[in-house]
Image (tube, rainbow, N blue to C red):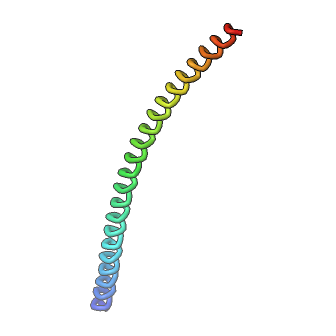
Amino acid sequence: MPLEFINELENKVDKLIDSLQKARNENKEINSRIQQLEQENSTLKNESESIKDDSLNSRAQLDTVAQKIKEVITKLETVE
């Protein structure tokens, strides 16, 4: 009886060790994926800021062009 009990405990310990190793491997994979996502997030944030800056610059250029068009229209109206 004690030998059976010891064998049973040994089997349970082996299963627990296997479960622990699987959990550690899964944890490593998850941490790796987290790092990848953090890097991707950082890249996307930088790209988003760049696009935002480009958009603001384009907006400023459009505002300048619109102002010049208004000035030309005003000049044309005074000619008539």
Res. 14 image quadrant: bottom left
* Rendered-image quadrant of the C terminus: top right
Viewer-proximal residue among 68 and 5: 68
Res. 15 image quadrant: bottom left
Viewer-proximal residue among 32 and 15: 32
Q: Position of residue 57 (x, y in %)?
A: 46, 29
For the point 27% across and 91% down, the residue is 3
Q: Position of residue 5 (x, y in %)?
A: 32, 87
Viewer-proximal residue among 50 and 10: 50
In the picture, measured across the screen, residue 12 lies left or right of residue 61, that is: left
For the point 52% across and 28% down, the residue is 59
Residue 59 vertical position relative to residue 35 in the rendered view, above or below: above
Q: Position of residue 53 (x, y in %)?
A: 44, 33
For the point 35% across and 74% down, the residue is 19
Residue 34 vertical position relative to residue 67 in the rendered view, above or below: below
For the point 56% across and 18% down, the residue is 68
Of all residues, the one furthest to the front in this rendering is 80
Res. 32 image quadrant: bottom left
Viewer-proximal residue among 61 and 53: 61
* Rendered-image quadrant of the N terminus: bottom left
In the picture, measured across the screen, residue 72 lies left or right of residue 58, that is: right
Q: Total label count?
A: 0
Of all residues, the one furthest to the right in this rendering is 80
Of all residues, the one furthest to the top in this rendering is 78
